[in-house]
Each structure stands twice: as C-alpha cells, then as structure tokens.
C-alpha cells in the first residue's frame, strides 16, 4: 500500500490541514486494474476532525477493494469557505494522480460524517460554481464528486440545525446561513447520494437527512437512504473499532451501513 500525507497550504488553511491518501498497490497479476476512491471528511462540529471517523473507516473501504483518502480540513477558527476550498483542491489532486494511482475516475466519491457530511454535501451542490474552481485553479469537472456518502450529516441551518457547526463554520456571520443550508442548494448537477441516519440522533436530528433527501427527490437525483431506529450521534462504524473512550457509539444494527454503501458504490 502507498501512503502519503499532502500538506494543504491554501490561503486561510491552518498548519495541520492535510490530505492523507491510502492507495492499494497495482499488480499486473490482479484482475482489478482500477479501483474506486473514497475521500473521507471526518466530523467534529467544525471544531476538529474526529479520529473515530477517519482512518478506521478508510481501512474498511480499503478492505472492500477501494482506495481511500482522509481530508484533515481546517476547523475553527478557520471559517467558510476554506474547508470547501481544501476539499475541492483535494479532489483536483486526486484526479491529477488518477492514472498513476490506478483510480477509476468515474468512481471518486466523497464521504462525510456529521459536519464532515455537511462539507461533503457542500462540494456536491457547489462543485459547478465558478468561484470554487477559480479558487483552486481547476475546472468544474476536476473537482466534481461522482457520488456522496453522507453519514448522519449536518445539512440545514433552519429549525433542525446543529447550531454549533454553523457557528464554527461561519464565525458568527449569519448572512451565510441561507447559502449553507444545503437542502436549499441541491440542484440538477448534485451527484448520486447514499445517506444514513438514526431516528434517535439527539445532536443532529434525522430531519437533516430527510430534508436533503426530499430536495434530491425534487431534482430526481438517484438516492439511497437508510434510517435506523436506534443509535446516538457519531456512530462511525458503530462497532468496537470506533467506540468512544466510554465504550459508547456501538450499535450493532447500524454496522450494515458500510456494506450497503459498498454495494451502492459498485452500482454507480
């Protein structure tokens, strides 16, 4: 496996911002010549990037035959749009190395948990905007994700908002809230999407996913959505590998999301 950390030095990036790539070795002796790549955006309320939603999930996708990458984007005090610029730059970087790393260019998807889901979905709805491509010197096609995998995502700045995420992302600039309420930004160019949430999520209510799914439906964007009846926020893999320090974040029935997402990815 090829492992590399690429520091991100965009204007406004914090010193710890980086892209971490995990590329499976190519072999002439293998039937698989090109692999999908899953680019992960960990959650953390835009205050940090959660270790529980980073490498452990990346390794699961590696085990299923994908390449993977983890974006350690700039959290607060960095504010919008630097996180989105870092994600767009990361997409550009990955596509530029797709031939070298034997990546299937039609299956580069962005995955995100919680606030990382908001970041992933932001690229999904904003990738075609001229300002974003200009910010990272890329064409829209270079930064476009082929799909989104959203895990209990932060979506709306309205009634069901996770206020802390938006306070951190905007730095308190309320004029950005309408634009960053992503159920209002879905458009005909939003990519295919896989989402899951839990009915009992007490931090980011399930309505965040429901609102996004409803908007995707309006534009007839192919969507797969799973709502599990039980589970706290931030489950990650929902098993012992990503359990918190208190042994929590284990919800056996929710562990199926990874295999479901893998099946969805194969069918893109």
Image: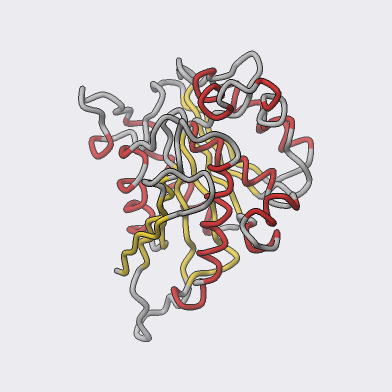
Q: Residue 267: which quarter of the image?
A: bottom right
Residue shown at 40%/52% (left/top)?
18
Q: Position of residue 3 (x, y in %)?
A: 31, 64
Camera-side residue: 137 or 118? 137
Classify the position of the N terminus by image quarter.
bottom left
In the displayed structure, would residue 190 be above or below residue 7? above
Disc count in the image? 0
Looking at the image, can residue 214 be seen? Answer: no
Q: Residue 155: which quarter of the image?
A: top right
Left or right: 44 as drawn, with respect to 169: left
Residue shown at 51%/57% (left/top)?
90
Q: Position of residue 192 (x, y in %)?
A: 65, 49
Residue shown at 74%/30% (left/top)?
184
Q: Position of residue 68 (x, y in %)?
A: 41, 58
In the displayed structure, would residue 72 be above or below residue 233? below
In the displayed structure, would residue 184 be above or below residue 219? above
Outermost residue toward the left in this view: 246
Looking at the image, can residue 185 be seen? Answer: yes
Q: Position of residue 193 (x, y in %)?
A: 61, 44
Camera-side residue: 103 or 229? 103
Outermost residue toward the bottom in this view: 28
Camera-side residue: 50 or 193? 50
Residue shown at 35%/44% (left/top)?
54
Classify the position of the C terminus by image quarter.
bottom right
Left or right: 237 as drawn, with respect to 264: left
């Amino acid at each position: 496996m090829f492992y590399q950390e690429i520091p991100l030095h965009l204007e406004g990036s914090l010193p710890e911002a980086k892209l971490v790539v995990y590329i499976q070795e190519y072999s002439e002796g293998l039937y698989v010549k090109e692999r999908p790549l899953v680019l992960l955006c960990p959650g953390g309320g835009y205050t940090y990037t959660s270790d529980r939603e980073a490498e452990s999930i990346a390794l699961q996708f590696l085990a299923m035959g994908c390449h993977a990458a983890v974006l350690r984007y700039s959290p607060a005090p960095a504010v919008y749009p630097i996180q989105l610029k870092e994600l767009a730059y990361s997409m550009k970087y990955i596509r530029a190395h797709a031939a070298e790393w034997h990546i299937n260019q039609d299956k580069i998807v962005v995955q995100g948990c919680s606030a990382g889901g908001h970041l992933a979905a932001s690229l999904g709805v904003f990738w075609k905007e001229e300002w974003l491509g200009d910010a990272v010197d890329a064409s829209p096609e270079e930064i476009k994700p082929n799909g989104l995998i959203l895990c209990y995502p932060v979506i709306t700045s309205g009634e069901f908002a996770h206020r802390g995420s938006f306070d951190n992302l905007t730095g308190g600039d309320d004029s950005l809230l309408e634009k960053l309420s992503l159920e209002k930004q879905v458009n005909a160019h939003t990519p295919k999407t896989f989402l899951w949430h839990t009915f009992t999520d007490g931090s980011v209510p399930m309505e965040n996913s429901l609102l996004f799914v409803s908007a995707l439906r309006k534009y007839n964007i192919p969507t797969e959505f799973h709502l599990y009846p039980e589970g706290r926020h931030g489950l990650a893999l929902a098993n012992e590998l990503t359990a918190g320090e208190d042994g929590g974040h284990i919800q056996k029935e929710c562990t199926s999301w990874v295999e479901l997402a893998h099946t969805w990815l194969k069918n893109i």
